[in-house]
Image: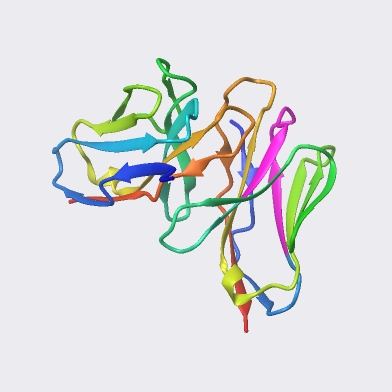
Amino acid sequence: NAGVTQTPKFQVLKTGQSMTLQCAQDMNHNSMYWYRQDPGMGLRLIYYSASEGTTDKGEVPNGYNVSRLNKREFSLRLESAAPSQTSVYFCASSESSPYGYTFGSGTRLTVV
Amino acid sequence: QKEVEQNSGPLSVPEGAIASLNCTYSDRGSQSFFWYRQYSGKSPELIMFIYSNGDKEDGRFTAQLNKASQYVSLLIRDSQPSDSATYLCAVNEMDSGNTPLVFGKGTRLSVIA
């Protein structure tokens, strides 16, 4: 039982490049989330999908787009990467509110 | 803006002692409360959740909730060096559909052998 799988685990981008972070869960959860974690800033919500077919902005959505491809998959796209997007990105899923999350292992992204 | 506040630490306790981690939240509508543990370089993992005022115990861990004071805490009894990690408090509104969790910035705990 894999839980929440994120790819890639590490990535280095040049400023202006684009990339998509992939996330898939095998727990049949309805809700999926993307957070970024920066030193001293805690976990900040980028986007979330409460259920298949819906997406909503979180606290820090600028520079990102998301796609809820199906119930299992929720991807995060950086269209034109900036050094300020250097961070660790976590995908998470939950059955629904008010249950807790299961997190993926994270993607460490560096933009140079 | 909903806020969840935690002392960043580090909180240092000797092995075998009780570690007390505290969290306050701003939104009186918050209904469910979670504690996550995050080891350095790893993802957060759920330790406990609590919905009702009072105490909830699970092994060496006890979560305490006081909604009137907007305060939730985590006690770790018989602390071990393996408990050294960052502990994240998270809250959400149970009655507002699938609202995402709001996380505190975490408290770093160091258990000294």
Question: Where is A76 relative to B14, above or below?
Answer: above
- For image coordinates 50% across by 42% down, the residue present is A102
Which is more toward the observer, A65 or B105?
A65
For residue A36, what is the image quadrant? top left
Magenta-colored stretch includes residue B23: yes
Q: Main SS type for the magenta part? A: strand
- Left or right, residue B74 beside residue A55: right
Please provide percent x and percent y for residue A64. 30, 30
Toward the top, the furthest residue is: A53
- For image coordinates 16% across by 35% down, the residue present is A18
Please provide percent x and percent y for residue B66. 83, 43
Magenta-colored stretch includes residue A82: no
- Left or right, residue B33 beside residue A78: right
- For image coordinates 60% across by 76% down, the residue present is B81
Which is more toward the observer, B31 or A80?
B31
Question: Where is B9 relative to A112, above or below?
Answer: below
Please provide percent x and percent y for residue A50. 49, 22
For residue B70, what is the image quadrant? top right
Q: Which residues are magenta?
A: B20-35
Toward the front, the furthest residue is: A1
